[in-house]
Image: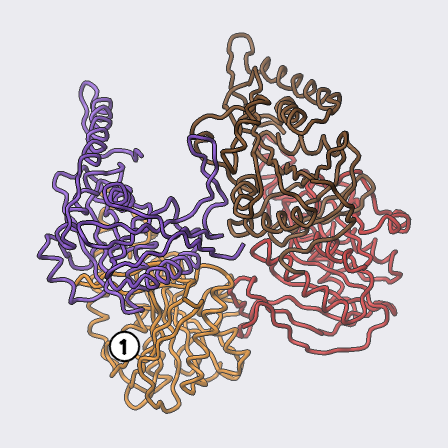
Chain colours: A red, B orange, C brown, D purple
Amino acid sequence: MDDIEIDEVATPELADPVLIEGLPGVGHVGKLAAEHLLEEGESTLVRRVYATEFPPQVTVDDEGVAELTCAEFHAVEMDGTDLLVLTGDHQAATNAGHYQLTTAFLDIAESFGVERAFALGGIPTGELVEEYSVLGAISDSALREELEAVDVEFRADEPAGGIVGVSGLILGLGHRRGLQVACLMGETSGYLVDPKSAGAVLEVLEAQLDFEVDFGSLEDRAEEMEEVTGKIQEMQEGPSMGDDELRYIG
Amino acid sequence: MDDIEIDEVATPELADPVLIEGLPGVGHVGKLAAEHLLEEGESTLVRRVYATEFPPQVTVDDEGVAELTCAEFHAVEMDGTDLLVLTGDHQAATNAGHYQLTTAFLDIAESFGVERAFALGGIPTGELVEEYSVLGAISDSALREELEAVDVEFRADEPAGGIVGVSGLILGLGHRRGLQVACLMGETSGYLVDPKSAGAVLEVLEAQLDFEVDFGSLEDRAEEMEEVTGKIQEMQEGPSMGDDELRYIG
Amino acid sequence: MDDIEIDEVATPELADPVLIEGLPGVGHVGKLAAEHLLEEGESTLVRRVYATEFPPQVTVDDEGVAELTCAEFHAVEMDGTDLLVLTGDHQAATNAGHYQLTTAFLDIAESFGVERAFALGGIPTGELVEEYSVLGAISDSALREELEAVDVEFRADEPAGGIVGVSGLILGLGHRRGLQVACLMGETSGYLVDPKSAGAVLEVLEAQLDFEVDFGSLEDRAEEMEEVTGKIQEMQEGPSMGDDELRYIG
Amino acid sequence: MDDIEIDEVATPELADPVLIEGLPGVGHVGKLAAEHLLEEGESTLVRRVYATEFPPQVTVDDEGVAELTCAEFHAVEMDGTDLLVLTGDHQAATNAGHYQLTTAFLDIAESFGVERAFALGGIPTGELVEEYSVLGAISDSALREELEAVDVEFRADEPAGGIVGVSGLILGLGHRRGLQVACLMGETSGYLVDPKSAGAVLEVLEAQLDFEVDFGSLEDRAEEMEEVTGKIQEMQEGPSMGDDELRYIG
């Protein structure tokens, strides 16, 4: 196959669509948030992206049917706003692969008329989070004011290590193409899949893009995670110890 | 050399040939099963596939003659059924290499008129296996019924980690070309080369493709492995211990 | 994007410009020295070099604005001498990437008329340095005399492991294009970011290229590092121990 | 630069030249043997091969002059026999790189009219060697008799792990081009640079290609290594212990 192959599943007309990226990363925050939009909105699969940079792998569904690893774009309508939502199970395997893949993603987004994008992710704090702040990074300083108005925080030079992977490149390569891009990073311990952090990121999107989404299933999942966390804390504390730091639990 | 070079050793006419893939993997189940077909049927080497993704290596035979690492296709006739059997000692070294190599394999299969394929492999259970079930994964839900009729099991979302390597891509890329593909995975401890598991996989193939194969040499090899296993268990148990889990023995 | 993309920010006329390379390496000596030239001289950004061999990463500035990883060329005038200064935060990820990237760097340098180059770096001594010698390696034996005249030392077969990365290739590939190249390596412990070693390298450049630079800010930074070093030594020595060897501190 | 660049330093007419390859490997046996031929015969540098698969590195000579990593071909006349000797300090970094590099090496050899090749190397025994046997592997069974006549041993299926790297591919890819290739592997502990093993390999070449070479400098180096070995054994044995196994010493 070619390095990248794109299946054009559907090509609906979208009105000023906004790209939302949620691939796997810290706390699976971006992935949880993007998948929640797919579940709650009216969503149509529009593109599948296969890439030789992805693992050579199929997943098997509950009928035993195999599906080749790919990333997917769905068109999702939320209260009249058109979103183009990018999800998947993998990032690229090499530096060059990340650049090639993000270039393909942005080509697709532009073919639908995208001019604005949000890359969703998590930012690790190293300890259990009480209040879920959402940190921002932007392609253009003009975006800052409107994001601060919906409670996005900006902290000088954070995240200190920069933003890596597809989210980082949607900012970096998207800006080079003239897109307006913001990366929204939900604070998360970094040790747990974190539906609450995903909820905090979605609340920002709701306010910014003027739609409403039901958080029920995300809250259910958050409760499950809290039970798990609780049990782990009990185990760790045992008769006499306590420690805020946890190992990663997916 | 080019990334992939193919020696056309012979090009016999084959009637509705079925591709059987058996490259190295868990318990060498697929490789043992495929090689057993080569030994027992009337087999003709038809293609050698060299690839820069394979290790830069020659093997040395019992006369001291070196042979460059390659994968091989043999045409094998089994009771009137034409098989095209893919075997070899290596998989690719990189993600992209797996995709390129499997693409070349499928091109060859299609040049012989292949429309159906079986990827053979093992699925690790982590403990010694008493009854050798064969698990299935398919490119198309229509294949399920006929495979269940020959005792292939389907378990929702198994294998949990998906199917990786050439077997996975023969399913995934084969489906994208319109081939009907099943992956047959023999249960195996995962710690031992497992001729019994290979036998279980071959029994499914016999029933499905309507041929009979002599299992004598495979049973001999299974007995040798059992002697080895027995000795290891004795050593491990010593005067007082026992443990079902073994290290890998090839 | 292409493997390498170059933004032509400005293309001033330069008179016999000298390429100065200071990418990250041992003790960040080359990077500190090159960045100091940018700060002290009259400097203009002329090229940005993006490469798929760089990490897929953006950095975030104090306004929250993301910038895609790149290397930069600045034209810097120092007392009438035109310098073309190459700086950045990363080297390439693979062997082949180093060659491709250095080739692009040399193409840019030649487009500005560069015929002479200095690759700046550090050479690790493994212990705290008292007197900061600068070691040289050259593309052509004819360069040796004039460098010895400005106190560059040459020691047979040093550095023993050769010179790796972009600095090594500017020597090696630059020579193949007919450039006159010297690598100036400041002695440094190898465990600390070392502004003093960078100063020693700059003193050689001053004498060789006949300009003067203010060392104030570099000395301030050196003092900060010495405080850090002092504290670490105290901690290590505690009531009774001493050890010249330190861990890396950036 | 291109993936591979070749400097044509000289192109003398050679009569039925024989390719001798001696790149780094086990005990540096092949490299020592090939370099000894360069020193003792009448040798002319004919090609330098640069490759982006080599480390991005220059070495520095005793005058401080840097030389870019490359492999070299020398034409060497030994008692009327023309040899084309391939030496260097590195192998390739990736699987594909090994194939590309060996392809370039064989192209050069064929441009000089080479039809026969010897790949020189070591085969590790894991213990100190008393009698230095030389093991053979060949591209064609017709070569076996004449090699056995000059004391090359052939052992079924040895080396068990095959032959990897450029030596293996000169056999494998050379055979695919119709060259007659033998790999000569001197037994060596695998822990020491082994001039004696290199001598044993050269004695085979002398008898096979009908030339004589002075072993003086190789014997001197072997004596130095024996002194080192002796001291290490003393240290290891101390007052009461002994062990035939040594760590690698270069």
Q: Is residue A199 visible?
A: yes
| As drawn, D26 above or below A23 | above
Say which residue appears at 59% left-offset and 45% top-offset.
Answer: A248
The residue wearing badge 1 is: B38
Q: Among all residues in the image, which is located at the extreme top?
A: C239
With D196 as the anchor, is A54 left or right in this view? Answer: right
| As drawn, D190 above or below D210 | above
With B194 as the anchor, is C39 left or right in this view? Answer: right
Q: Which type of secondary structure does the marked residue at label 1 adopt?
A: helix
Q: Nearer the viewer, residue C51 or C7?
A: C7
With C123 as the anchor, is B224 left or right in this view? Answer: left
Image coordinates for residue A190, horizontal then vertical, percent: 65, 44
Say which residue appears at 68% left-offset and 26% top-offset.
Answer: C206
Image coordinates for residue C176, horizontal then vertical, percent: 52, 47
Say which residue appears at 37% left-offset and 63% top-offset.
Answer: D107
Q: Is residue A225 visible?
A: no
Q: Amino acid at mark 1?
A: Leu
Q: Nearer the viewer, residue D100 or C204?
A: C204
Image coordinates for residue C181, horizontal then vertical, percent: 57, 38
Q: Nearer the viewer, residue A218 or C143?
A: C143
